[in-house]
Image (spheres, rainbow, N blue to C red):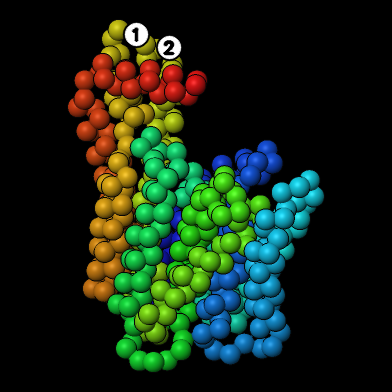
Amino acid sequence: MPTSAFASLLIAFVAAAGAVPLLRDMLRDRPTVRSAGAVAMALGVAVAAFYSDPWPASDRGLIFGAAALVLAGLALDARLAGAGGATVRRIFEVVGTLVAGVFLFTYLEHDRVTWSVGFMMLAAVSLLLPIATAALDRLPSATPSLPAGMVLVQLLLLMFFGAANADGGSRYSLYAEFAIVALPVIGALLGCLVYLSSMPWRTRPGVALGTGGLLALGFMISWGALRLGSITAEVRGGTTALLWLVAVPVFEFVRESVGRLAGRMAAQRWLQQPGSAGLRHLVQAVCHAHYSPAALLSIQAALGLAGIGLCKLNTSGYFLTLALLALGVAYMLVPVYLTWRRPAASLGRAAYSQHGGDRA
């Protein structure tokens, strides 16, 4: 499957930006989802390996080792709330990272996928974890069901994409280069959903294991979605088309970052001068522009279907990436324009209300 190097570089750039809040939380020793990406990569490659060419017994031992790690995490999750739980969580995080690295490089050494595909998988998982948990959960109009709705839309898109690429046969195999990227992507999103949700044994969101164990549930669902169709046919640009299925969380992360920068700019003294009223109104519009949850879900569904359609038309990966970049720019400009058309007084009241709410 040809993979666009430009798309890989684009994902790497966004992943580097998305890793900043993740690293900050790690340095401050705050609860985060840092182990979910490692387990996501490990299980994604494991599932793809089981339904591709046979592996040596040693490699299958690694697969069963990863499964044992997940089962142990599920069993110990409710029992790690004490003082020693932090040490156990860190051990699981280190082990999960090592297992993921072994799977990734073993897969590359066996020439099953190209380095660009492996790099895309690593970058996609590393950027989706901080983006899905941070951007969607911090929206002004966020609801508890928004992350769940976004994951559901993306899962349905992935199911449709897998069925559209099926060869119609009964072969028990997954097309490796597609599955190795698709499984970690949707699994990481579902892992974020589990992290944000309350569970029967806990009333507050958060997983004692750092989400490493419960992320397996996401892979079970995503693997089942892909198994609806036996994915063995080569799809031109299929890996790049996956970007369209997960675009909205990425767009929201970038939009939120721009809004924060505009908020810092609005606090500058020179912007409070009487002659800067027009620019001040524009900066306020950038700060307060956002989509409703219904609009976010609708946009993600439309983008995903468009990406799948372009992929089926054998559109090159370069065009898919450039078109998605253009749509991303439009995605960020439309709410700014709609907010900018509102009277400046209403924006001022919204800013005051938000400031008061933050203080409270």
Q: Is residue 63 visible?
A: yes
Q: Residue at x 40, y 23 (%)?
A: 354
The quadrant of the rendering that contains the N terminus is bottom left
Q: Position of residue 235 (x, y in %)?
A: 35, 77
Q: Is residue 251 above or below residue 274?
A: below
Find numbered disc 2 in the image and state the secondary structure of the residue it sits on.
helix
Residue 113 against residue 72 in the figure, above or below: below
Element carrying mark 1? loop
Q: Position of residue 343 (x, y in %)?
A: 21, 20
Q: CA distance from mark 2 to mark 1?
A: 7 Å
Residue 85, percent from left and from top: 75, 51
- The residue tagged 1 is 273
User: Which residue does the numbered mark 2 point to in the structure image?
Assistant: 269
Residue at the bottom extreme of this rendering? 170
Q: Is residue 214 left or right of residue 225?
A: right
Of residues 297 and 250, the one drawn nearer to the viewer in this rendering = 297
Quick one: 11 or 52, which is closer to the camera? 52
Q: Residues within 10 Å of mark 2 (few under 14, many from 20)?
A: few
- Quarter of the image where one finds residue 266: top left
Residue at 54 percent of width and 89 percent of height = 53
Residue located 62% across and 40% down the image: 24
Disc 1: CA contacts within 10 A as few (<14), some (14-19) or many (>=20): few
* Amino acid carrying mark 1 in the image: Gln
| Residue 261 in the figure: left or right of residue 100 | left
Determine whether label 2 and label 1 are within 8 Å by CB. yes
> Is any atom of residue 16 visible in this view?
no
